[in-house]
Image (cartoon, rainbow, N blue to C red):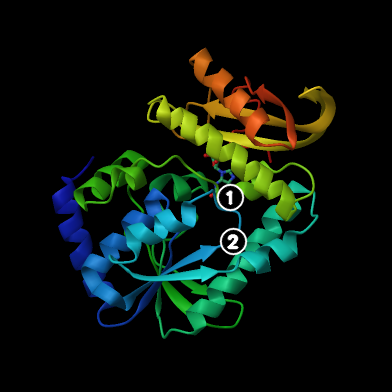
Amino acid sequence: MMLDPKDFIEEAISKIKEQIGDEKAIIALSGGVDSSVCSVLVQEAIGDNLIAIFVDHGLLREGEVEEVTNTFKDRLNFNYVDASDEFLDALEGVEDPEEKRKIIGKVFIDVFEREAAKTDAKYLVQGTIAPDWIESEGKIKSHHNLALPSGMVLEVVEPIRDLYKDEVREIGLELDLPEKVVFRQPFPGPGLGVRVIGPLTRENLAICRKANKIVADEIEAAGIDKDVWQYFAVLTDSKVTGVKGDQRDFGYLVVVRIVNSVDAMTAYVPELPWEVIRKISQRITSEVSEVTHVALSISDKPPSTIEFA
Ligand code: XMP
């Protein structure tokens, strides 16, 4: 950490005040650590002139809407936008992973732009952190404008662009954000959309969401959530024969993936307590009726990626 968290916060607040003044700003709040820290920091500087927009794309984890809402509704000028039908209608039956990402990205811009147009915001706050722009070869300038497809131009403000993840977490703790937010596992922007292989439908998403909840509950109950980087379940498009009760069953294969990493560029599968893995498998096959088989992913990155899509 280059600066003491208190000093960083004080300096950031005065810079933000100077830059934004009495104008309004808008931020897309996902509930992840970067956008959360950024929102709270800017709120401290300009108060309710920061309009935080939390877009529900229908691809969130179980309980996530309630968690994010409860954390921020009294602390920010918090606006929840339920756009789940718009996203899920556009995604219905789409199989190709890149196509899914493209659709999610496009609908997100449509929704966000519509919300931005309802305000008279002049600034767009983004929770960009150092690895985000260093990885894109430093091509993102610190001061730039963003022209939305409608022609609306917002000036971009990136208060935490020089920080690394561990520093963002320290700032989050100093800002009194709950530990649950500060140490939340990374979750991809396209959400569960990249954890359903094959056709994305509301039914498949529901299966994927239930399996993810079981993985999260068991990893957290075992107290190993802070020891691993990410833990989740992927619904594959493979169907396999199983037996439930005394009946043959033909259901889905779900893959459980638990990895360790420092920066998501590389990752490895750590040794895991076997009883936790067995419990996850047993719970998924007994509680999610569409699933007959659970496999554990044992591939590192590289050559695999962390997500399956
Ligand atoms: P991969 O799968 O490329 O993931 O090894 C590296 C890290 O990035 C997350 N991830 C994403 N995050 N939008 C995001 O905001 C995305 O489209 C996306 N895809 C992957 C992934 O969860 C992991 O932490």
Query: Can you give x and y, in whole percent of width and height, for residue 24 in the image?
Result: 34, 80
What amino acid is labelled 1 in the image? Gly
Graded by Cα atoms within 10 Å as few (under 14), some (14 to 19) or many (20 or more), the crowding at tag 2 reads many
Q: Residue at x 31, y 82 (%)?
A: 23
- Left or right of residue 291, residue 215 in this image: left
How many marks the image carries: the answer is 2
- Identify residue for label 2: 57
* Relative vertical location of residue 264 with respect to residue 57 in this rendering, above or below: above
Q: Residue at x 51, y 83 (%)?
A: 117
Decide: is 258 above or below 68.
Answer: above
Task: Give above or below for 76 relative to 93.
Answer: below
Is residue 271 among what the camera can see? Answer: no
**Is mark 1 in CB contact (under 8 Å) with mark 2?**
yes
Decide if ligand 1 comes within 8 Å of the CB at mark 1: no
Residue on which disc 1 sits: 191
Residue 226 visible to an observer of this rendering: yes
Q: Which of 26 and 59 is in front in this view?
A: 59
Quadrant position of residue 184: top left
Task: Name the quarter where the C terminus is drawn.
Answer: top right
Marked residue nearer the N-terminal end (1 or 2): 2
